[in-house]
Amino acid sequence: MEHGILSLLPPVLALIMVMLTKRVLLSLGVGIIVGALMVNQSEELFVNEAIAQIFSIVSGIFIVDGGINTWELYIILFLLILGMIASLITITGGSRAFGEWALTKVKSRIGAQFVAGFLGIIIFIDDYFNSLTVGNVSRPFTDRHRISRAKLAYVVDSTAAPICVVSPVSSWGAYIITIIGGILVTHGVTQYEALQAFLLIAPMNFYAVFAILLVFAVAYFKLDFGLMRTHEERAQETGELVDVNKGPVPGESEDAKPVAEGVVSDLIWPIATLIVATVLFMVITGMQATEGQRSLLATFENTDVAAALLYGGLISLVITIAIAFLRRLPVKHLGVGLWAGVKSMLPAIYILVFAWTIIEIIGELGTGEYLASMVDEHIQLGFLPALLFLVAGFMAFSTGTSWGTFAIMLPIAGEIAAVTDITLMLPVLAAVLAGAIFGDHCSPISDTTILSSTGAGSHHIDHVLTQLPYALIVGVISTLSFLALGFTGSVWIGLLVGFATFGIAVVILKLVITKWIYKEV
């Protein structure tokens, strides 16, 4: 059944409720129920059918076609393992030792945010891996400088997907290059190969470029406003890095307290093992799944990210437990630490399960297809990149998935360019990629948004509401850049417009924030 514009109701309703109630699970639950009822409204016992569908989707997260669902279930298991690793590192004193060491090396709040941002850029292999690893590694030194967890989550989220989407050697890059290759073959484009096209598209991904730049501008110029400013002021004045009134946050536990005198290596070894083992298993699983010539691109195209994370996590957990024994941690404290780590990740897992469920229902409603159909082939061509950027952004926002948006919108954009003006092929593909990241950053049901708040130890709702204004600012900058690109055909002019707008935005924000501070004083 076609639902048209009504297919937007569940995700929009969930977003409105999140903003009004500040209760993520309740809001997602209402969106799930409304969506399921809409999908089954033509059935005689539509309420029973809706309940059955929700149960089927949730059970499908664990079991599919009579076997284990190795994607969602492995991600959940990895989160539990990561919670246990983080908890044991805390109990053995590794986090405290690393924080004290980092405090001697990173001497300012700006420096701490810069280090977290650079870590987000360096770990470009996968966004899930990036979000969880950078957040956990950065917490000790950002905590010491009283940087709020909401701020850290923003730094993590706004570097993870943007760097992955422009990196050819990443799970994202391999996936996108595969889609682009099919589009080029379909429309007989032979002047460049898929990898070359991807590299040419990268500087046109204005959202990725300016989202990363804004992270460092916000840190250097102290561009904290709105709810972000509230979180930062509370952190600096009281030392409370999260809003304690919202309860425990993912990755945190009152039971996980240092009981041993740890050293810096107690944190470095588990994290280094996690990184090396995960990358190794990404290569191994990619090679095993690759038929024919095993190139680096083909390896990352076929890699099993979820399995690699799980295997890498298990090896890291073994190393962490071994360190705990070396520190002569009593078995009782070891058990307490492991269980505390499991409990610390349960809130994030609940949100993730709810998000996956509503994404499935949104797919049944045809929300993505409806948004794609809104693209009119008869508009003035200069507006096309900007229009596709906004449509892809709203699709990713509504569906919570960048990759789903890529799969739907990239072929549509390629078809439009082939029919209208083939020279627009790369700009419109870049617009879709940029728009998908934009919508992903604005969406409370995006899995990368959820995992960024988890890795940073922030309440999910705080991360969503503090990041949203910054994402919208970069969205406006990107829209103007795509307009310039669409009407001039020049990437350099698009970047010039973007940098000019970016500079104006930074100056305005700085002046407005300075005025607020002056008034308060």
Image (cartoon, rainbow, N blue to C red):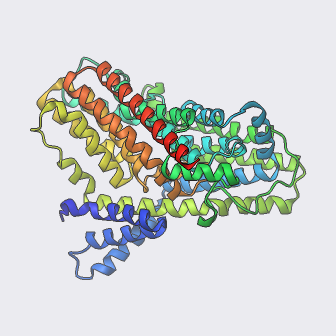
In the picture, measured across the screen, residue 397 lies left or right of residue 427, that is right
Above or below, comparing residue 418 to residue 52 in the picture: above
In the image, residue 355 lies at what x, y percent? Answer: 44, 60
Q: Residue at x 82, y 45 (%)?
A: 323
The one nearer the camera, 428 or 146, is: 146
Quadrant of res 168? top left
Q: Residue at x 53, y 32 (%)?
A: 216
In the image, residue 152 lies at what x, y percent? Answer: 59, 45
Q: Residue at x 49, y 40 (%)?
A: 158
Residue at the right extreme, as displayed: 328
Residue at the left extreme, as displayed: 378
In the image, residue 480 lies at what x, y percent? Answer: 28, 33
Quadrant of res 380? top left
In the picture, measured across the screen, residue 397 lies left or right of residue 371, that is right
Above or below, comparing residue 250 to residue 163 in the picture: below
Do we see residue 359 in this rendering? yes
Q: Residue at x 47, y 48 (%)?
A: 467
Q: Quadrant of the N terminus?
A: bottom left
The one nearer the camera, 438 or 144, is: 144
Residue at the bottom extreme, as displayed: 45
The one nearer the camera, 59 or 228, is: 228
Above or below, comparing residue 444 to residue 503 in the picture: below
Do we see residue 128 in this rendering? no
Above or below, comparing residue 178 to residue 521 in the picture: above
The one nearer the camera, 327 or 251, is: 251
In the picture, measured across the screen, residue 201 lies left or right of residue 247, that is left
In the image, residue 486 lies at what x, y percent? Answer: 22, 28
State the count of labels: 0
